[in-house]
Image: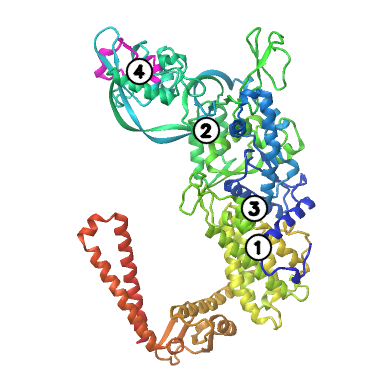
Amino acid sequence: MTQRLSDIPKAYDPQKVEARWYQYWLDKGYFAPKIDHQKKPFVIIMPPPNVTGELHLGHALTATLEDLMIRWHRMKGEPTLWLPGVDHAGIATQFVVEQTLREKGTTRHDLGRDKFLERVWQWIERYRGTIGDQHKRLGVSCDWSREVFTMDEGPSRAVRTTFLHLYEKGLIYRGERIINWCPRCTTALSDLEVEHEETEGHLYYVKYRLADEDGFITVATTRPETILGDTAVAVNPSDERYAGMLGKRAILPAIGRVIPIVADDAVDPTFGTGAVKITPAHDPVDFEVGQQQGLESVDILNRDGTMNDNAGPYAGLDRFECRKAILADLDREGLLVDIKPHIHSVGHCCRCDTAVEPWVSKQWFVKIAPLAVPAIDAVVDGRIRIIPERFAKVYLNWLENIRDWCISRQLWWGHRIPVWYCNECGEITVSVDEPRTCSHCSSSEIVQDPDVLDTWFSSGLWPHSTLGWPDDSEDLRYFYPTSVMETGYDILFFWVARMIMMGLENTGDIPFHTVYLHGLIRDEAGEKMSKVKGNVMNPLEAIEQYGTDALRFALSTGTSPGNDIRLSSHRLEAARNFANKLWNAARFVIGNLETKVSFAQIEPDSLPLEDRWIVSRLSHLVNAVNKLMDDFQFGEAERQIHDFLWGEFCDWHIEMAKLRLDEKPSPMPVVACVLETSLRLLHPFMPFITEEIWQSLRVRLDETTAESIMIAPYPTADGRAADAEAEKQMELVIDIVRAIRNERAEFRVEPSRFIEALVVAHDAESAIQSQARAIETLARVRPLTFIGGSDPRPDRAKTLVLGGAEVILPMAGMVDIDAERQRLKRETEANEADIARLDTRLKDDRFLSKAPSHVVDRERERLQEYLSKAERLRQRLAELE
C-alpha cells in the first residue's frame, strides 16, 4: 500500500485514510499477540463499556490512553495483548429495555421473566456490535478475537464459582439489614452507587404526647413521613433535660401506637431538640439503636416508594405525598410546633437520580473486611502502584474503613444468584451448576433465588475471568497478572479496589502491577459534561469534523494522570492544525527525495550546523519521550513531540533545508531521517496520519524493512548523536532571527520588506556567519553585516542584546521616524486619557461601595495594563529620539 507523490493529496483528509488503514491492520493480524515464554507480555484488559448505548468522551479518553500504551509496547517488541469487552450493566440495561416496553404500552411484568430476558438479549445483539464499531473508529488496536461479554458462559461460570467459594468460606451471607433502596429502579444499591447531595430541606418539630400523663416530648425530623414507622423516642443518657422522661411512653402521632422513651449514646444532644424519633426499618443509625434496644422494626414502604398497610390511613400514597398529608394533619392537631430551613445530605441513585430510601431488607452481603487486608498489603508493599500516588491514600483509607457489600439486586437482567431454596426442608443449596435436587434432603422441590448479583461483582473478576479462570488456561498462565489497569479515578472504589480484592482471593496473585487513573473530561469553562447541561460532545461527531488523530491528540496532549481535562473546539482545531502541519512537512520531504536515501550514509561530524543541531535535538527528544512514557507521563511526552515537530523541525530545520536543496551535501537524507524517526515517536498517539505518511516515505528509504509503522521499532536514544556545541550555536542563530522578527512586529514592518541588520557575534562569529543566508531569509534582513564589538554603530538604532551576540537594527531602515513618532504620541495621549478616567473612577467612593467586587477588581487590572502600556510607549519614544 505505497503511494507516489502525485497520489498524495495536497490537504490531509482523515476520512479517506482511517478506515483503510484500520482494515489493513486487521487483515495483517497485528492486534493478536503471539505467546512467547521467552518474553514478558504487556497486557491491558479493557474496562468494559456498558452495552446500553453509544460511547462517550470518557470512553474515547480511555481508548486513547490504552491504545497509545499498547502501540508503544508493541513497537518495543513485546507480546502485547489488549483484550476488549462489554459489560451487561444490570440496572442500566434493564432500565432502557423497560423504557422501550413502556413506549409500546407494556411492562416487564406483563411479559414475565423469560420473555423479558429474550427482549434484553435482542437489545444486546443489536447494540453490542455498535460499541465495537465505535471503538474501531477510535483506532483501538484490540485483539478482537478475544472479545468478552460479562454474560458469556466463561465469565458467568467465574461469577458462580466465586460466589460458591466465598459462601463456603463464610464470606457471603444472607441477612436483614438497612440497605439503600431505589424506588425507581426497585432494587437495592451498594453504598458506592449512592451519590449524596447537599439539599435545602426543612427540620420539622413535632410533639409526641405522653401516654400515661399530661405533657409531651418534642422531636425534630427531616422525614416526617417516617413517623409512621417509629418504635421509640430516644435521648442521650447524659442529657439532663430529659432525665425525667426515661422509662415513660409516648403516643405516636397519626397512628396512635404507644412507644417507649429510651436512652442511647447514639443520640446527638445538639441536634434539634435533643430528642429523636427511632425508625429502625428506615434509618441506618436507628436500625443499630433498635438492635441494641430490642425494638420492633415496622416497615412502612412498598417497593415503588408508596406507603404500605403499616402506614394506616396514608397507605397507597407516594412517600412525598404522604409527607404533605401527615404535615397537614399534624398541624391541624396542634402537634406541628415549628418548621426551620435545614441543609442536609440526601442520597440519590447514581443511575436515575431518584432519592433513595434507607430500608431494612433481607439481602446477600459479602464480608469485605477480610478481603480488604491483602488488597491493602499489595499497595503498601509496592506490588501494585497507583498513579498518581495521591490516590493511594484515598484507596487505603476506604479499604481500612470498609463496610460489608450488599451484592443482591432485585432485577431480572444479570447474573442470577446461584442459590436454590428447598420447599421441603427449608435449607439452601449453593452450586456452580444448576442442581436438580436439594443438597440436604434430595427433594426436587427447589426454587432459585429470584435476585441477580450486583454488576460490580462480575466486573471485579474481569482481569482473570476474561483470561479463562477458573480453568487453568494458557492465556491465564501467560498473560496474568496483567500489566496496567487504566480507568477514571471516579471508579477507584467501584471497580479497581474490588478487582484487587477478588483477584488476590481467586488467583492468589495481584490482577495488575499498575493502576493508571485519568481525570474527568470537562468543558472549556471547567464544568463536568452532562446531557442536562447541554455541554456534551459526541466523539463520533468530533471524528467526522476533525479526524480521529485530532480527537486523540486533543484528549491526551499535555494532560497528566488524575487531573481533569478541559476539551473545547479550540483544542480540537489546534490538533487538526498540527495534523495538517505534519502533512505539509511530509509532502515537502517526499516531494524532494529524488533517489532512495540511506541513513547509514549520514556522517554527523561532517554535517552542516543546522543538520547537526536537529539530529542532536531529535536524540534528546527520543531519550525524553522514552523516559516520560516509562513514567506514564503520556501527555507531556506528546507535547514535547508536538513542540519538536512544529517548532524545531518544521519552522526551523525544514525552512533552512529549503535554502540548500541544490547544494551538496543535500539536506534531504537528514530531513527524511528526522521525519521517519519522529513519525515512529508519534505513532502511538496519532496512528492513522503517521501510517499514511510513513508508507509513502518508507519506499524511499533503504533501511526501513517493516511493512507497517505499527510493527516498526520504537526509537531509542543514540547518545552519539548528541552535539551540545551545535545546539548552543544554533540556538543563538534562532535567537537572532526571533529577536529581529519580534522587533519587526513591534514596529509594524511590512512582512515583505527587508531591513538592515548588523551583528556583533563575539565568540560565535564563524557559526553565525555560516547561517547568514538563513538569517537573511528567515528574518527578512538585507544587508546583514558583521561588525566587531568596538566598531562604530549607527545613530538612532535599536540594539538587541542576546546571550552570545548583539543585533543592531537602524531605525531609519525600519520605520518613517517622524511618522512613527507622531503615531506613538497620539497613542500615548489616548492611553493617558484612559488612565485618568480609570484613576478617577477608582477614587470614587460611590463606585467602590456599590459596584460588585469582581467589577472593581477588573477595573484595577485594566488600570495596571494601561500603566504598563504607558511605560512601553515612553521607551519606544525614547528610542526614536
Counting residues from the N terminus, which is met first, the one under dot 1 or under dot 4?
4
Give the CA separation, mark 1 to mark 4. 70 Å
Quadrant location of the N terminus? bottom right
- Say which residue label 4 marks: 264
Residue 247 vertical position relative to residue 207 in the rendered view, above or below: above
Quadrant of the snapshot with the C terminus: bottom left
Residue nearer the viewer, 597 or 571: 571
Q: Please say if the residues under marks 2 and 4 sit with CB atoms less than 8 Å apart.
A: no
Question: Which residue does the numbered mark 1 point to in the structure image?
Answer: 717
Which numbered mark, 3 or 1, is in the foreground of this view?
3
Residues at marks 1 and 4 touching, judged by CB atoms closer than 8 Å: no
Q: Residues within 10 Å of mark 1 (few under 14, many from 20)?
A: some
Q: Residue at x 63, y 37 (%)?
A: 510
Three-letter code for the amino acid on which mark 3 is drawn: Leu
Magenta stretch: includes residue 176: no
Name the residue beneath numbered marker 3: 68
Res. 723 in view? no
Nearer the observer: mark 2 or 4; the answer is 2
- Say whether marks 3 and 1 touch (CB < 8 Å): no
Q: Amino acid at mark 2?
A: Glu
Q: Tell me how far mark 3 sits from mark 4, CA to CA.
A: 58 Å
Q: Nearer the viewer, residue 317 or 587?
A: 317
Circle 1 — which element? loop
Q: Which residues are magenta?
A: 226-253
Is residue 232 shown in magenta?
yes
